[in-house]
Image (cartoon, rainbow, N blue to C red):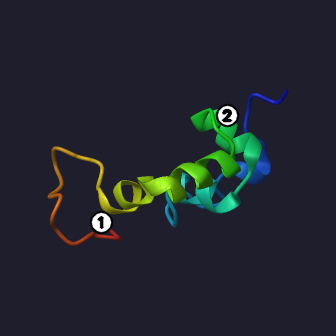
Amino acid sequence: MQLYLCHLQLLPNPHLNTPWQILFNSQNDWAFITTMGTDVESLDHILAAGFAIAWYGTPIPQHDVSASGDPCLWC
């Protein structure tokens, strides 16, 4: 069992996308299991069971960012 990420899971340019976006878009079971402890199919099932509303609609609280403000993509 591989417990580390390989070249294909690493960012070619970390200034263009977040690590989470790259990981999620890869849909790679090993990368999901290594970082979150669940595979792609299980996360899809959890999201489809109703968690998607909170997952996609709730920002992660940050002390220096307004939860209701517009995103600043190039700051």
Residue drawn at x 64%, y 38% is 38
Question: Gap between marks 2 and 1, in whole Å?
Answer: 30 Å
The reply, left or right, for residue 45 in relation to residue 56 is right
Residue denoted by label 1: 75
Residue drawn at x 27%, y 69% is 71
Label 1: which secondary element: loop
Residue 3: x and y in percent read 75, 28
Q: Quadrant of residue 24?
A: bottom right
Q: Nearer the viewer, residue 51 or 13?
A: 51
Residue 14: x and y in percent read 54, 57
Residue 53: x and y in percent read 37, 61
Residue flagged by tag 2: what amino acid is it? Thr
Residue 55: x and y in percent read 40, 55
Q: Which mark is residue 36?
A: none
Q: Is residue 40 above or below residue 2?
A: below
Residue denoted by label 2: 34
Q: Nearer the viewer, residue 73 or 67?
A: 67
